[in-house]
Image (tube, rainbow, N blue to C red):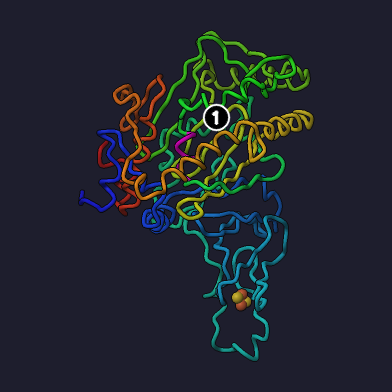
Amino acid sequence: MAEHRFDHLVDTANGTISRELFVSDDVHRAEQEHLFSRAWLFIGHESQIPNPGDFFTSRMGEESVILCRDRASKVHVFLNTCRHRGMKVCRYDEGNTPLLTCPYHAWSYSLDGKLVGVPMYDKLYEGVLDRAAWSLIEVPQLANYKGAVFATWDPLAPPFEEYLGGARDHLDLVLDASEGRAGGTEVVGGIQKWIVPSNWKFGTENFMGDSYHNVSHRSVDLVGISPNARSGIKGRRASELPGTEHVWLSYPQGHGVHSLRLPVENEYVDAFRDEPEVEAYFRRCYDERKTRLGPERSRWVGLVGSIFPNLSFHGRQPHSLFVWHPHGPRSMEVWRFYLVDRAAPEPVKDFLRHYYMRYSGPGGMTEQDDMENWNYATAASSGTIARRYPYNYQQSMHASVSSAPGTMQTTQINEQNSRDFYRRWVDYVSNRDWNVLMGRDVL
Ligand code: FES
Ligand SMILES: [Fe+2]
């Protein structure tokens, strides 16, 4: 494999990563050029666009895209730019419309992307403008995985499920409903969006399993915001069943997860004791899930994880998906999508929505701690002198073992997931081919 100018920034053998990854314009440009233009990216959830004509404006890297459902109910993802002079065709966050009409000169596109309206066409364009050739620019590949819509700009990217690899089992723990029904979740409430003066990779990395930073959440744990908080139970989430094992896995495609494995003999632990209706619902789901998935598979519970490059999730509490959109090298826009079981009673959804907001988002007590760390880390890494010194990634250097080809697993707090993520990251920004990016070259 040919040496690339970015290779020296990532030294996973010695456990060091250059600060340039988090502050440099040059690195940021390479990410836009070679990473966000090729990787599969999360766009939105189909529950956000249930009806024909529904749209949700999303992002792929730094570019705006439109996720929409056409009249035949087919889902599309288009670049949000007019083919005439580039005006943003859709300036709303979400809604329903029969047509996407450009605000500048009023070219109109149907929701399957076709250019259907050109003012004064007969007089000004007849015989010259081939409308069929000027549709909205559509992604060449789109995947709807259990309601979560992903897309890539690269026609050569492998199919989404191959891209997901073994991390799929853990993403399932997020997208499936609590009673184990495949893809039985939906987005509740609006999307929370906010800007953090930090590089996007701080988010991805934190949610690959950086439990080491738990100490920074000490104040919220002392306050106690868990669903059992009114019963005087401290912490951020409901308690774990004694004997639960924490498992970290990193995958050859660059994904990393931190999931829980319940003991063989397991039972429901009170998680919503202040709310009898919510508690009864989740107790029933717990038993149903065991029956549906069987004793082995039902032992796995999702905690956190990141799907390469910028989708992360909370599997259990607060159940959500979030995206770290780059906004230049030292800024990111965070989007949080909160999930609930589609079939849950309204009071359950409502209770969860309140808990999620207490925990997450710019006003959430837990998430504020993370923002503060990433914000100041970025500022303190940007100076000429600071940039000369790499970050340390030597934690649990030899703890992980191979559990499947290209997959590393451990039960101790580690930075293996991060090391493996950055190893794959450097392959993307160096524009290496899909054999390398999928880890096929080492399997
Ligand atoms: S830029 Fe859209 S119609 Fe001119
Ligand atoms: Fe955190």
> Which residue is at a point 69% across and 32% down the rendered structure image?
358
Q: Is residue 18 magenta-colored? A: no
Q: Is residue 438 visible?
A: no
The spot of residue 333 in percent (x, y) is 56, 49
Provide the residue designation for mark 1: 173
Query: Which residue is at the front of the view, 287 or 355?
Result: 355
The spot of residue 126 in percent (x, y) is 60, 89
Position of 262 with respect to 339 (left or right) is left
Query: Which residue is at the front of the view, 317 or 394?
Result: 394
The spot of residue 396 in percent (x, y) is 34, 24
Secondary structure mostly seen in magenta is helix
> Which residue is at a point 55% across and 22% down the rendered structure image?
293
Position of 333 with respect to 424 (left or right) is right
- The part of the chain drawn in magenta is 200-207
Quarter of the figure with residue 11: top left
Q: Is residue 169 visible?
A: yes
Find ligand 2 in the image and state its quadrant.
Answer: top right
Q: Secondary structure at mark 1?
A: helix
Which part of the image, by quadrant, shows the C terminus? Answer: top left
Q: Is residue 206 magenta-colored? A: yes
Which residue is farthest front? 385
Which residue is farthest left? 2
| 32 over 214 or under it: above or below | below
Dot 1 crowding, Cα within 10 Å, few <14, some 14–19, many 20+: many
Position of 371 with respect to 212 (left or right) is right
The spot of residue 408 in percent (x, y) is 34, 28
Query: Which residue is at the front of the view, 185 or 220?
Result: 220
* The residue carrying mark 1 has its beta carbon less than 8 Å from ligand 2: no
